[in-house]
Amino acid sequence: MLAKRIIPCLDVDKGRVVKGVKFFDHVDAGDVGECAARYEQQGADELVFYDITASHEGRQLILDVLRDCAERVFMPLTVGGGIRTIDDIRQMLNAGADKVSINSAAVRNATLIRESSLRFGTQCIVLAIDAKRVKQPDGRETWEVFIDGGRKPTGHEVVAWAKKAQADGAGEIVLNVMDSDGTREGYDLEMTAAVADAVTIPVVASGGAGKPEHLADVVTLGKADAALAASIFHFGMYTIEQAKRCMAARGIPVRV
């Protein structure tokens, strides 16, 4: 079995790391470069960097912040936010990103995932899904994809959207369940497992980590290939090493 990855997430707004609850009420969590360097020292497997207001504000990701982050770390770096075109992806890769995460633009441009994976390779292209449980008028619950920083519903069903992304050439999926985001009450194991069962590419679970046991649960019960977390690491509740020790104690393969 491949080692399960632990991936800290830097949500960046105006050049600072922030963290909110269910995508709102953000508080400052530190300097981007300093956070990145700390997680490098702690043994993070990868790092995800999201400019969380770029798509909503209709602007590009802040390249100088990305370059500073890339210069401080040697682990793989995934970036997202405000990416709309092939040229945007090229700029991100040239600025130091190893992978580029696409969310809103994949909804607005149905061919972007396919075109970018053909141009740069599937290993570079990540589909980020901001997912939410939605009650329909008839009482049914559906899992819907949202864009623009979780502000706009799309009508796309989460599992079907993940399967389409794989068919179009995405090499990885980051599933962020908005209902769990920032709550520290645990990941949405049901939705994560459903997406993981539906695709063969790696699935990174996001949203809800509050203790190391939650990370262990999502890569076992939730069938995820990696666990992405923010609050528990940003605010010193736990270190990456503590999370990996917890997972290893449960027989989960991790990179020590």
Image: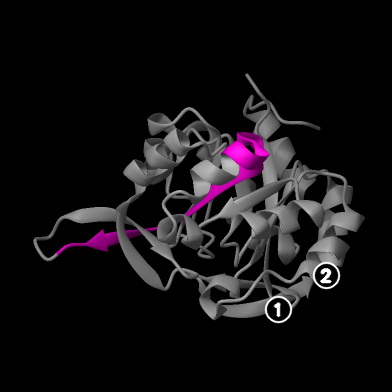
Q: Position of residue 142 (x, y in %)?
A: 24, 54
Q: Which residue is mark 2?
A: 64
Q: Position of residue 232 (x, y in %)?
A: 66, 59
- Three-letter amino acid code of the residue under disc 1: Asp
Instruction: Select label 2 or label 1 by which is in front.
Output: 2
In the picture, the disc for residue 28 is: 1
Depth check: 38 or 212 in front?
38
- Three-letter amino acid code of the residue under disc 2: Asp
Q: Is residue 12 left or right of residue 131?
A: right
Q: In terms of image quadrants, where is residue 156? A: bottom left
Give the residue drawn at x 47%, y 70%.
148
Q: Is residue 68 left or right of residue 51?
A: right
Quick one: SS at disc 1? strand
Tell me which label, 2 or 1, sits earlier in the chain: 1
Give the residue drawn at x 42%, y 49%.
188
Give the residue drawn at x 68%, y 43%.
6
Which region is colored magenta?
118-136
Give the residue drawn at x 68%, y 27%.
3
